[in-house]
Amino acid sequence: MKKCPMCGTSVDEHASECPECGCPIADTSGFSLKSSPGGSKKSGNPMGKSISTGSGLTDLLREGDDAYDDFDDTSSPYGSIPISLSRTNVGDLNIKKKSKLGKYIFRIVLLCAVAYGIYYLITNVLMTDKAKSYNQALDYFVEAINEDDVEKMELIIPPYIDKTGSQAKDYLENLGILHINSYNVRDLTQMATADIESLQDSIKLETGVTARIKEGYSMMVDLKVTVEGDSSQYVKGSSFMITTYMEFINIKDNWYLQINSYENIDYN
């Protein structure tokens, strides 16, 4: 027997309504705790939502910061927590920041290297007035004498000689009384490999420096000169021809006058 939920009258188990008040009586003979679709047997939640003690927001609160790692509970009524907030992705962001910083540093270093290269090119190549041929070296020699220009004479002094300027001054003191009106290359001969090696050995012995000579030329030059300075040997204002032997050598793509090669001057 069962009782009416309304008036409390005893009612037959198979009755569908109370005989006294007419209240509908539910059939409970097949009742079970089945969960609705999507529900949970543990909770018996009539709304069909699972509430467990090992996942979702409850676990998130219990486990603290560690629960953020890879948490993406799509069953939560509030939606999923973005994966971008996880510690793993924060680490990735730090790596990306370091990578960008490294790229910036590399670019700065590269720009500095390029700037130094441009500076070196301008100061050591473009702005350096070196003789690029033996003919130009001969022109510098003549101009230095006529202009009494120590700096121009230094341009054709080989790099293995002391660059204090004293050598250039000595050259000009010996020839400073002369003015070269014109010159003519009488004979031009390219130096043989054996001659270049012999000259390098001589330079090494005298200066202790290895002169890497690429090529060289020896020449006989006629100089038509006029005496402009005071001299006990020559009359001021007189003109005559000088024949001299000169050697020009190429070191690092610059041409220089070989030391002492023009000192043996033949005055006619």
Image (spheres, grey):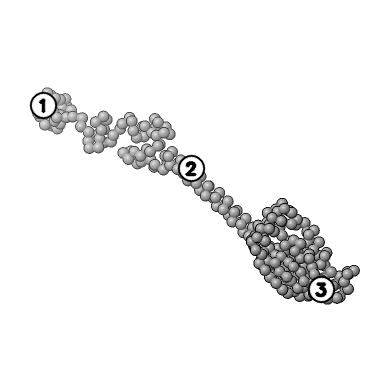
Separation of marks 1 and 2 at Cα, in angstroms: 72 Å
- What residue is disc 3 on? 268
The secondary element bearing badge 1 is classed as loop
Q: Going from the N terminus, do you reach mark 3 or mark 2 first?
A: 2
- The amino acid marked with disc number 2 is Asn
- What residue is disc 1 on? 13
Could you say which disc has been placed on residue 89 in the image? none
- How many C-alpha atoms fall within 10 Å of the one at disc 2: few (<14), some, or many (≥20)? few
Residue at 34% from the left image edge and 35% from the top image edge: 56
Separation of marks 1 and 3 at Cα, in angstroms: 156 Å
Q: Nearer the viewer, residue 47 or 128?
A: 128
**Left or right of 249, for residue 238:** right
Which residue is outermost to the right?
232
Q: Nearer the viewer, residue 61 or 132?
A: 132
Whether label 3 touches label 2, CB < 8 Å:
no
Name the quadrant containing residue 37. top left
- What residue is disc 2 on? 94
Percent x, y for residue 100?
51, 48
- Front: mark 1 or 3: 3
